[in-house]
Amino acid sequence: MFVLETERGKGIAVAVLAELEKWAVAEGFETAILETGNKMTAAIRLYEKSGYQRTPNYGQYIGVDSSVCMKKDLMR
C-alpha cells in the first residue's frame, strides 16, 4: 500500500488496512501477516498502531535483514 506524501495524515492508510482486514476475516482468515522494509518507518508505525507485532521473517523473507514481518490476530 502506498499513500502520496501530500495525502498522508488523512487516515487513508488506516482505512485501507482496516478494509483489507475486514475482507480477510470475511474470507475466513484469522491472522494477517505482512512484510515491509526496515527503512519504511512510517509503515512500521502504522502497523504497530493498528495492532501488528513483529514476527520472525517467513518464506522468501527468511534471512533478509532489510525485511520486517508483522502479524496480527484478526479475531480479537
Image: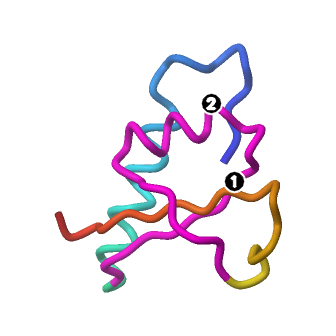
Q: Residue furthest left?
A: 76
Q: Nearer the viewer, residue 53 or 12?
A: 53
The image shows a total of numbered marks equal to: 2
Residue 71 in percent (x, y) is at 45, 65
Q: Which residues are magenta?
A: 29-58
Residue 34 vs residue 67, the one in the foreground: 67
Residue type for callout 1: Thr
Residue at (46, 49) in percent of width and height: 17
Q: Position of residue 34 (x, y in %)?
A: 58, 64
Based on the displayed image, in which of its 4 quarters is residue 20 positioned?
Answer: bottom left
On the image, numbered disc 2 is attached to which residue? 42
Protein image colouring:
rainbow
Q: Secondary structure at mark 1?
A: strand
Q: Quadrant of the C terminus?
A: bottom left
> Which residue is nearer to you in this view: 56 or 4?
56
The numbered disc on residue 36 is 1
- Of helix, strand and loop, which one carries label 2? helix
Q: Residues within 10 Å of mark 2 (few under 14, many from 20)?
A: few
Q: Residue at x 71, y 84 (%)?
A: 59
